[in-house]
Image: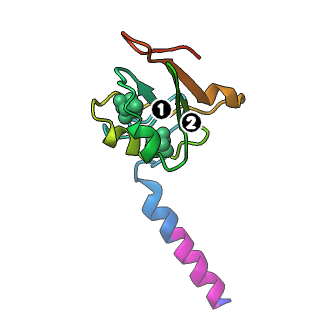
Amino acid sequence: MLKGIKSLLIGLLTVGKHLFKRPVTLEYPEKRPEVPENYRGKIVVDGCIKCMNCTKVCPSGAIKIEDNNFTIDLEKCIFCGNCTYYCPVKAIKCTNDFELATPDKSDLKLTYDIGGGKDERID
Ligand code: SF4
Ligand code: SF4
C-alpha cells in the first residue's frame, strides 16, 4: 500500500515538473521544424565533372553514373555525406529537405542529366 502511494506521488511529481515546460514535440505538418544548416537531407547535383569520386566513397552504392545520367538512389543512401565531402568541385550537396516519405519507391531514384551546362534533374 505504502509502495503504491509512493509510486503515485513520484508519478504526480514528474507530471507536475513537466506541466509548465514548453512541449518538445511539434504538431507536424502544421508546424515545421527548423533544421540545422549542416543537416543532411535530400541530395542534389549541379556542376558535376564526372570524376567518379562519389561513386567510390559511397558506402551503400547509392550513386551510379552512366554516360550523362547521374542517379542517386535515396532508398539506399544512408545520408553519411561522404559524397559531398570528397567531391572536388562541390557539385553534390545535401539539402535540408527532410520530407522524403513517399508511397512510391521510384520517387527516391533521382536522375540528373550531367551532359553539360546546368545539371538538370530528368527523373
Ligand atoms: S550521402 Fe553517403 S550513402 Fe548517400 S549517396 Fe552520399 S556517400 Fe552515398
Ligand atoms: S558529383 Fe562530384 S565527386 Fe561525384 S562525379 Fe561529380 S564531380 Fe565527381
Front in this rendered view, residue 95 or 63: 63
Q: Which mark is residue 42?
A: 1
Q: Determine if residue 79 is in view.
A: no
Question: Image quadrant of ligand 2?
Answer: top left
The dominant secondary structure in magenta is helix
Residue 74 magenta-highlighted = no
Front in this rendered view, residue 18 or 50: 50
Which residue is label 2 attached to?
74
Residue at the location (37% across, 32% down)?
Answer: 51
Q: In the rendered view, how is the structure colored?
A: rainbow
Magenta highlight range? 2-12
Amino acid at the residue labelled 2: Leu
Badge 1 element: loop
Amino acid at the residue labelled 1: Lys
Front in this rendered view, residue 17 or 80: 80
Residue at the location (38% across, 40% down)?
Answer: 39
- In the displayed structure, 118 sits above or below 4; it is above
Badge 2 element: loop
Residue at the location (31% across, 37% down)?
Answer: 37
Measured in 3D between alpha carbons, the distance from the residue under mark 2 to the one under mark 1, in whole angstroms, is: 8 Å
Quarter of the image for the C terminus: give it. Answer: top right
Q: Residue furthest right?
A: 103
Front in this rendered view, residue 8 or 39: 39
Q: Residue furthest top?
A: 117
User: Is label 2 or label 1 in front?
Assistant: 2
Lower position in the chain sequence, tag 2 or tag 1: 1
